[in-house]
Image (cartoon, rainbow, N blue to C red):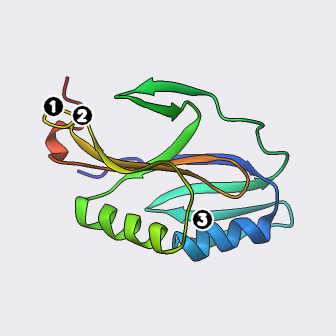
Amino acid sequence: MDRPRFHLAFPVRDLAEARAFYGGLLGCAEGRSSPDWVDFDFHGHQIVAHLAAAPDGVVTNPVDGEDVPVRHFGVILDLASWRALADRLEAAGVDFIIPPQIRFQGQPGEQATLFFLDPSGNALEFKAFADDARIFAR
């Protein structure tokens, strides 16, 4: 089934830095741009980095024993792609907020997850479910 794609705009402090991070490290193809913003293909979704003041500080909520950033975005990958990304981020020396791990182990929503900040302080989460059919399971 085809699903709608999402669009997310977020602040960054420097577009060259955003291009290096999203285009270089994460491998997102660049789309349209202007002197004030740049589009990226984020696993088939459109994200737009806008040159603006980035948020100060990270507000968190506890989830399965971890302090999860409340304001974050990301994508659900298959497990092999998630592992490859985790390995690439670890090799690049990314400072994780929450390092690669399995959350809700043995429960319906079991998932691999990791959190880190982009250079402007925006929190990203990448996850993979043990069983994609259980993404919304209770």
Q: Is residue 22 left or right of residue 134?
A: right
Identify the element where label 3 is drawn: strand
Q: Residues within 10 Å of mark 1 (few under 14, many from 20)?
A: few
Marks 1 and 2: in contact by CB < 8 Å?
yes
**Does 67 sit above or below residue 130?**
above
Q: Amino acid at mark 3?
A: Phe
Dot label at residue 40: 3
Residue at mark 2 to residue at mark 1: CA–CA distance: 5 Å
Question: In percent of the image, x 59 and y 76: which residue is there?
Answer: 24
Which of the 4 image quarters holds residue 51?
Answer: bottom right
Q: How many marks?
A: 3
Q: Amino acid at mark 1?
A: Gln
Which residue is painted at 69% across and 71% down in the image? 19
Residue 44 location (% of width, % of height):
44, 61
Q: Nearer the viewer, residue 111 or 42?
A: 111
Q: Mark 2 falls on what kind of element?
A: loop
Residue plotted at (49% across, 31% down): 67
For the residue pair 14 and 63, the one nearer the viewer reads as 63
Tag 3 or tag 1, which sits nearer the N-term?
Answer: 3
Mark 3 crowdedness (10 Å alpha carbons): few <14, some 14-19, many ≥20? many
Question: Residue 68: where, in percent of width, then height?
Answer: 49, 33
Which residue is at the front of the view, 63 or 37? 63
Q: Nearer the viewer, mark 1 or mark 3?
A: 1
In three-dimensional space, the C-alpha distance between marks 1 and 3, rounded to whole angstroms, equals 34 Å
Q: What amino acid type is highlighted by mark number 2?
A: Phe
Image side of residue 130 versus residue 118, left or right: left
Q: Is residue 4 left or right of residue 38?
A: left
Q: What is the C-alpha distance between the residues marked 3 and 2?
A: 31 Å
Q: Which residue is mark 1?
A: 107
User: Which residue corresponds to mark 2?
Assistant: 104
- Local secondary structure at mark 1: loop
On screen, 112 above or below 38? above
